[in-house]
Image (cartoon, helix red, strand yellow):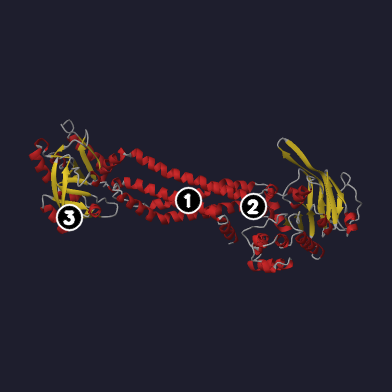
């Protein structure tokens, strides 16, 4: 108890210095948490990907389509449970800044495969019945205030023209990690339009989504699918949905790596600040530590005093940063949204981020105290008594 | 009290600041030097000294004469390069650092020039510090601390921190800390060096009481002639030589 009393009082003896050090820790660890959350959000689509779904696309590039009839050749392959299709639409609603993803899908086969999307049954049936109907995600609906019954005019870019859809259903995600910031409409509607306007592009799709019976066989089934279309006009590349999502993130991999590096650099910076604080503190109190040693307290006791004080400061910074994280993350997301940047539909703090914040706090506390501990423990009593702090 | 002549100790002969009984402190052929860069500076050379139990010895000398060094060696916070120092029959120069720390906590009370109190602890807690190294219960520690603070006249200042006390009061707290564990020996390094005249007189009076009424053995380094007068033996150290000036001190008394 006496030890804790001494540590606690010493920690707040120089209140301004301790307060600023704690503030620095809070800022650095909160920044670390926020940057880690940004990195996590970047990979949100990857994390949500299913292990039992494969994406089959044109082997040359995603830009090139595949014939619709490939579906009938994929379906009978051993291990394939179901096949659906999806095409990126890429239209513009309102303006370029109000971007959201739009996909043309074969709804009756697509949504049963994506069970993480939850529909109101009546809305779902209305959507199936309306060829021009659109199903939009909850995050998208909340973002732009879409409601069931709204008409959404979209200017086609890949498929030039003016398109109009009617919101028939708003779907939710099964959990907060599911992205619901996209719009789906019927592939038949797209294909009819293309037949009329761009007949040579008709009956083509962007990708096939293949559901397998056994996730352990994905490599084998992928190879079979690609072997089926080897040496054809449109050879395929089949990969897991996770790998497919990762390929998009990989385009910005350098930025993600930079963000991750910065998150660790801020921790190193605060380590230097905390180490300076402890070094100054220990240097000022050298005569006190020497007095304690003269009275009979051992070097280990003196070392523990310094370490405990460093831990107290670090713990306060770590706990405060953990408590601040939810509010900071929400404010960050809100600020992005206010600026029209909606890059992270899923922006959730991973529980491990909190663990890392506390771990880094104690790591900083320990490392910052290391040199002062050794110095104070080793100082000769006569030299320490002569020291003027 | 020894009536030794005021003469330098001959080589190999100890200066005795002792009565007829066995010496509490026996310093034999002690030498100590310090390294300053590449230079080795001898500070003490073949020093011999006896201090009897219950004696009050003042150690004086010019700056750099080694008196604080000798004090530090006797207190066990430094080790000589050569020689032996026996305190109550135990040669402390043979102790390990850990043993020395334990020995100090039980046997030595320190009184420093600048008090060296812990600023974040109040008077009670500062005095309690040495008792934390004993096996005493909290209640026993409390009793001893209160008794000791009453002895030094600071019973009403227990909950005051050092910055709330005058210099003289701080030194009295330091004296209380030095005696609370009833050590064999009190080591005082310039105890009045940072005090005004009145406070110095109070502190010296207290030290005399501790010596005369409680039989505490005190070895004190001082530049202050008034402090020297409070002692019963005066030993002068210069150029590595100890001289017992006790008759001089006795004459003044």
Q: Quadrant of residue A72?
A: top left
The chain carrying label 3 is: A
Provide the residue designation for mark 1: A25
Give above or below for A62 relative to B104: above
Q: Nearer the viewer, mark 1 or mark 2?
A: 1
Residue closer to the observer: B31 or A94: A94
Which percent across, then down, holds residue A29? 44, 50
Of helix, strand and loop, which one carries label 3? strand
Q: Nearer the viewer, mark 3 or mark 1?
A: 1
- Callouts 1 and 2 on one subunit: yes
The chain carrying label 2 is: A
Of helix, strand and loop, which one carries label 1? helix
Pointer 1 or 2: first along the chain:
1
CA distance for labels 2 and 3: 72 Å
Which percent across, then down, holds residue B232? 85, 58
Pointer 3 or 1: first along the chain:
1
Report if residue B135 is visible in the image.
Answer: no
Q: Quadrant of residue A170?
A: bottom left
Provide the residue designation for mark 2: A289
CA distance for labels 1 and 2: 26 Å
Which residue appears at 89% of the width and 54% of the height?
A: B248
Which percent across, then down, holds residue B206? 77, 63
Provide the residue designation for mark 3: A169
Report if residue A65 is visible in the image.
Answer: yes
Q: Residue furthest left?
A: A196
In the rendered image, which quarter contains the N terminus of chain A? Answer: bottom right
- Side of B46 where B120 appears, left or right: left
Pointer 2 or 3: first along the chain:
3
Q: Residue furthest top?
A: A231
CA distance for labels 3 and 1: 47 Å
Q: Residues within 10 Å of mark 1 (few under 14, many from 20)?
A: many
Which percent across, then down, holds residue A134? 16, 51
């Amino acid at each position: 108890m006496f030890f804790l009393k001494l540590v606690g009082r010493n920690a707040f003896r120089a209140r301004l210095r301790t307060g600023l050090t704690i503030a620095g820790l809070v800022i650095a660890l909160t920044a670390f948490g926020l940057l880690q959350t940004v990195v996590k959000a970047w990979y949100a689509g990857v994390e949500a990907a299913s292990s039992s779904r494969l994406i089959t696309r044109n082997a040359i590039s995603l830009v090139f389509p595949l014939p619709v009839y490939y579906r009938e050749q994929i379906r009978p392959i051993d291990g394939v449970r179901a096949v659906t299709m999806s095409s990126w639409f890429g239209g513009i609603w309102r303006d370029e800044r109000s971007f959201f993803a739009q996909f043309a899908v074969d709804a009756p086969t697509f949504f049963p495969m994506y069970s993480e999307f939850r529909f109101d049954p009546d809305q779902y049936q209305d959507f199936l019945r309306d060829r021009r109907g659109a199903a939009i995600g909850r995050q998208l609906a909340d973002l732009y205030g879409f409601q069931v019954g709204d008409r959404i005019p979209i200017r086609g870019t890949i498929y030039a023209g003016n398109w109009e859809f009617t919101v028939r259903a708003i779907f939710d995600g099964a959990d907060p990690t599911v992205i619901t910031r996209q719009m789906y409409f019927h592939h038949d509607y797209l294909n009819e339009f293309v037949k009329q306007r761009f007949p040579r592009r008709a009956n083509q799709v962007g990708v096939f989504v293949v559901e397998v019976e056994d996730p352990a066989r994905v490599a084998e089934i992928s190879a079979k699918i690609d072997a089926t279309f080897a040496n054809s006009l449109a050879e395929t590349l089949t990969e897991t949905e996770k790998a497919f999502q990762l390929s998009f993130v990989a385009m910005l991999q350098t930025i993600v790596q930079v963000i991750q590096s910065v998150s660790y650099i801020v921790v190193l910076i605060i380590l230097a600040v905390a180490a300076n604080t402890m070094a100054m503190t220990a240097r000022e109190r050298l005569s006190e530590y020497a007095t304690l040693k003269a009275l009979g307290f051992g070097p280990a006791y003196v070392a523990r005093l310094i370490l405990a004080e460093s831990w107290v400061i670090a713990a306060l910074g770590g706990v405060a940063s953990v408590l601040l994280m939810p509010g900071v993350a929400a404010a960050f997301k809100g600020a992005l949204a206010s600026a029209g940047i909606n890059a992270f539909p899923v922006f959730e703090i991973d529980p491990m981020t909190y663990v890392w914040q506390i771990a880094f706090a104690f790591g900083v506390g320990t490392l910052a105290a290391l040199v002062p501990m050794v110095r104070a423990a080793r100082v000769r009593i006569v030299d320490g008594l002569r020291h003027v702090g | 009290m020894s009536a030794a002549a005021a003469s330098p100790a001959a080589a190999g002969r100890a200066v005795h600041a002792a009565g007829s009984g066995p010496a509490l402190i026996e310093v034999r052929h002690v030498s100590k030097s310090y390294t300053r860069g590449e230079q080795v500076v001898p500070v003490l050379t073949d020093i011999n000294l006896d201090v009897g139990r219950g004696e009050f010895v003042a150690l004086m000398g010019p700056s750099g004469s080694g008196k604080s060094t000798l004090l530090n060696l006797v207190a066990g916070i430094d080790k000589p390069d050569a020689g032996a120092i026996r305190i109550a029959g135990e040669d402390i120069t043979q102790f390990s650092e850990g043993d020395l720390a334990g020995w100090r906590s039980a046997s030595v009370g320190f009184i420093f020039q600048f008090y060296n109190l812990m600023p974040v602890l109040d008077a009670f807690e500062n005095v309690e510090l040495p008792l934390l190294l004993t096996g005493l219960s909290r209640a026993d520690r409390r009793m001893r601390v209160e008794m000791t603070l009453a002895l030094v006249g600071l019973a009403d200042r227990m909950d005051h921190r050092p910055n709330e006390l005058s210099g003289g009061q701080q030194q009295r707290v330091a004296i209380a800390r030095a005696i609370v564990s009833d050590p064999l020996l009190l080591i005082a390094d310039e105890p009045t060096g940072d005090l005004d005249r009145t406070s110095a007189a109070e502190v010296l009076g207290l030290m005399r009481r501790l010596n005369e009424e409680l039989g505490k053995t005190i070895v004190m380094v001082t530049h202050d002639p008034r402090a020297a007068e409070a002692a019963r033996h005066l030993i002068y150290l210069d150029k590595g030589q100890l001289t017992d000036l006790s008759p001089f001190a006795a004459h003044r008394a």
